[in-house]
Image (cartoon, rainbow, N blue to C red):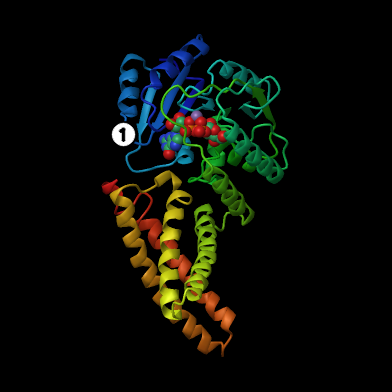
Amino acid sequence: MTMPQVSIVVPTYNEAANIPMIYDGLAQALAGRAWELVVVDDDSPDGTADAVRELGRRHGNVRCIQRVQARGLASAVHWGVQAAHGEAVVVMDGDLQHEPALIPKMLDALQAGHDIVSGSRFLEGAAEKGLSRRRRRLSDYGNRLTNYFLGTALSDPLTGFFATSRRLFLESIPLMQADGFKIFFDLVYHNRRVTIRELPFEFQSRRHGESKFQLYVLWLLACDIASKLSRGMLPPRLISFVGVGLIGSIFHFAVLYASMDLGAVFWLAQAIATVVAMVFNFTINNVLTYSDDRLRGAAFYKGLLLYSLIASVGIVANVSTAQIAYMRLHGHTFIAATTGLVIDVIWRFVVSNRLIWGGSSILRKAH
Ligand code: GDD
Ligand code: MN
């Protein structure tokens, strides 16, 4: 096999039925070129990895990276780029929403000197069959937010279809967010001086399986931007976690006052509010902060129990630290209380990030 000039990197989660069609589309669009397909699959239960290997038995230019432990869209793409052989890399969805016919045009634009070339769903000339009105509106908000932040005027800064040189991508990976999902946005953010070219394409409706893009994506985008504003010091997940915690504390006070209005004594009202806020925080974090690793069924309830345990330990640490700070600072209530809260949040984040969600979760086998 000749060395491929271009590597098509496709992250997949439950795309088994789409894989052979993607291959055919690519073979047709890239006829005459040396190309390869690198699929990075997060151990999809529908057997996507097997489908790719099956394809690989028939075609020498197909490889599968089956990730048994690692998870997440961005890191999947990074792994694919790190395994790529081609001088150019193209990232595309594994659900047939991105048309392979655009790839030769992308490669031409790279040839012509553009550093990054993207497929835009919204550029003049593009048609979007694949977006519902609600999704279109979500995308609109996301676009405005990202363009404002990047200082660009891209018609589709959140596209998942783009091409660049392997070298540029590899150099950017250490700077990029491994647990994000806006890979193109992240790449552009770290390469603001390079030339970017958008090409219109027709965004197809999904043939099989379901889209993973929902409202939470906008929330994660905001957290991602906040993280970049902190120069990466605060990870997006921590920001999301704290954000959920803040909303949770509003809930806490609402329930506290409501219970007291209904005649509950303070300690009881506080206890009810604490439990309600805890369940709220856990449930919302499960959907927003850890949307890519959501616990379901029995694992959800086990997670909730574990989270409550972790949170109780956090409350003890919080109150004792706050008390020590309070005595040392001779009664600076605000600073003492904040110190306790910060300790509490960090404790809860670090421990639940390790034990409840993510690659090292002890509930992992249960879901
Ligand atoms: N390995 C891996 N791990 N692949 C994933 C994961 C994951 O956690 N989540 C999603 N994928 C794969 C899907 O199987 C699909 O091939 C591709 O990544 C994109 O996911 P979709 O579920 O098809 O996303 P979408 O079509 O709703 O979202 C599109 O628009 C977004 C912005 O509007 C995509 O183009 C996204 O890349 C894009 O950010
Ligand atoms: Mn898609």
- Residue 324 point in image, percent of width and height: 47, 85
Identify the residue shown where x is 52% and y is 70%.
253
Residue type (three-letter) at the residue carrying disc 1: Pro
Classify residue 107 as left or right of residue 36: right
* Residue positioned most to the left: 365
Q: Residue at x 38, y 50 (%)?
A: 358
Residue 224 visible? The answer is yes
Observer-nearest of 257 and 141: 257
Q: Which residue is mark 1?
A: 45
Residue 64 placement, left or right of 117: left
Residue 243 in picture, x, y percent from top left:
54, 59
Q: Split into 4 quadrants, where in the image is the C terminus?
A: top left
Q: Quadrant for residue 48, please give it.
A: top left
Question: Which quarter of the rendering shows the N terminus?
Answer: top left
| Residue 86 placement (x, y as % from top left) | 50, 24
Residue 166: x and y, percent? Answer: 54, 30
Closer-to-camera residue (314/102): 314
Q: Eyeballing the image, is 41 above or below 258?
A: above
